[in-house]
Image (cartoon, rainbow, N blue to C red):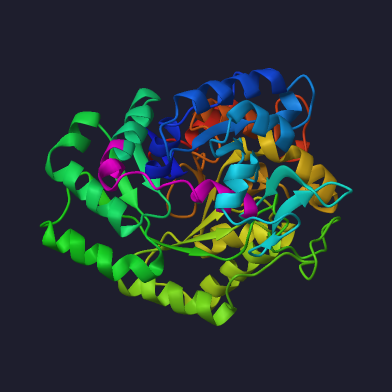
Amino acid sequence: MLMREAHCHIGLLGAAMALPTVTRCASVGEVLAMVGQLARKAKPGQWVRVLGARHQGWRERRWPTVGEMDAATAGVPTVVMSMDWHECVANTPAMTLAGLAPGARVGANGVVHVDANGLATGLLIEHAAYAAWESAPAAPAGALPGFVRAGLARYQELGFAEVHDLRTEPALAKALLEMDASGELARLGVRVAMFPLVRDLPEVFEMVAQAGGCGRLRVGGGKIFIDGTLNARTAATLQPCAEPIAGCTLGKMMVEPEEIDAQMRACDAFGLPMAAHAIGDRAVRAVLDSVARVRPATPGTRIEHCELIDPADVPRFAELGVTASVQPCHLLVDMPVLTRVYGHALHKVLPLRSLLASGLRAGSLVGGLVFGSDAPIVGPEPADSVLAAMTLGDGFASLNPGEAIDDATAWKCFAVG
Ligand SMILES: [Zn+2]
């Protein structure tokens, strides 16, 4: 069986693979020892950035304090990012260089966490976490091809023959076109489908034309963001979530329906389907409504993630020929937020069995049910999604037991159909 990764970020995966991780650390002490060692090796101006923190799994079940971080890292700006990229802990130099004041709000839902005395704890949430992360000096200009190579090599190792990149910046498209032209994609044995933001489609098409077309590379569609995420509580839902952020009781729609229609028509004009990031049931419905209005001539409109689908909308996927591109492996990390914040909607979590029963075909890119990982948000290992699809949970507990599918069907959702 040839396997397809239907949703990842190749360049980011390669970049993440080049960074150290604390995934093997079992305690706060081990994390501090690791960042301390990296800080001692850092050259002037360099930051220490590590990935993969899962503080619930550490002996102390807490993040390091800012005091502990400062003591361990001797003035070297340091950021320890959570495994799901939704929060991090930073030391004082990193927060200072990132301009993050105690208690500050950053972007739509970023918070610089403070203790009862109003002092920064080092914990940074959502946009505050990204702000600290991105304040480190950027990777050198020529680094991207190396990251892409590393990311694709990882997919080759896992046995994937096709990889879909779900937000292909023009710079990434350029790197991929060069790898295609030099025969490197052929040597890796992978085909790549690029999904630039709809606004970047003309530029990417121009690049493809100038390169004289592409062999193992293609433009797969245009990407659009309809809502936010569950962990950030910005996924657009039909009912209020239990712990809404101020002014976002039903999450957050990023675009008006007219804009979804317009972007769908723009993709259609390029002969491409639209791939819409929609996580909450309200966002999913907005995309289905748009398909019903626009009726694009190009088949294969995709809804990425659709982690919550209202029962009334389940049959509409097959009726409208819309593909559900889902990442069951996210349940392995999203179970706490789903039960705590979206407890009212657990019967809407990835209704895989009902989607297939209503006519979606496992592995098909038109009116299909396809699996991916969204790496590097989580790891790219397909077995994680298969396990999560078989339990609709983390392998131990299930969020939506009636909607689980068997392992053969789950693997078929990775098959190049
Ligand atoms: Zn993604």
Within the image, what quadrant is residue 284 found in? bottom right
Locate residue 336, reporting x and y percent.
78, 39
**Front position in the image: 281 or 230:** 230
Q: Quadrant location of the C terminus?
A: top left
Q: How many marks?
A: 0
Residue 255 is left or right of residue 191, and the answer is: right
Locate residue 282, reporting x and y percent.
69, 65
Within the image, what quadrant is residue 232 found in? bottom right
- Farthest-out residue, bottom: 258
What residue is shown at x 32% (from left), y 67% (from top)? 201
**Front position in the image: 216 or 356:** 216
What residue is shown at x 54% (from left), y 26% (from top)? 383
What residue is shown at x 44% (from left), y 72% (from top)? 264
Locate residue 30, reporting x and y percent.
65, 18
Chief secondary structure of the magenta portion = helix
Residue 102 is left or right of residue 197, and the answer is: right
Locate residue 269, reporting x and y percent.
32, 75
* Magenta stretch contains residue 18: no
**Front position in the image: 266 or 297:** 266
Q: Report the span colored magenta.
A: 128-146
Looking at the picture, does residue 113 appear above or below residue 392? below
Q: Quadrant location of the N terminus?
A: top left
Q: Is residue 332 visible?
A: yes
Q: Is residue 64 visible?
A: no
What residue is shown at x 73% (from left), y 22% (from top)? 58
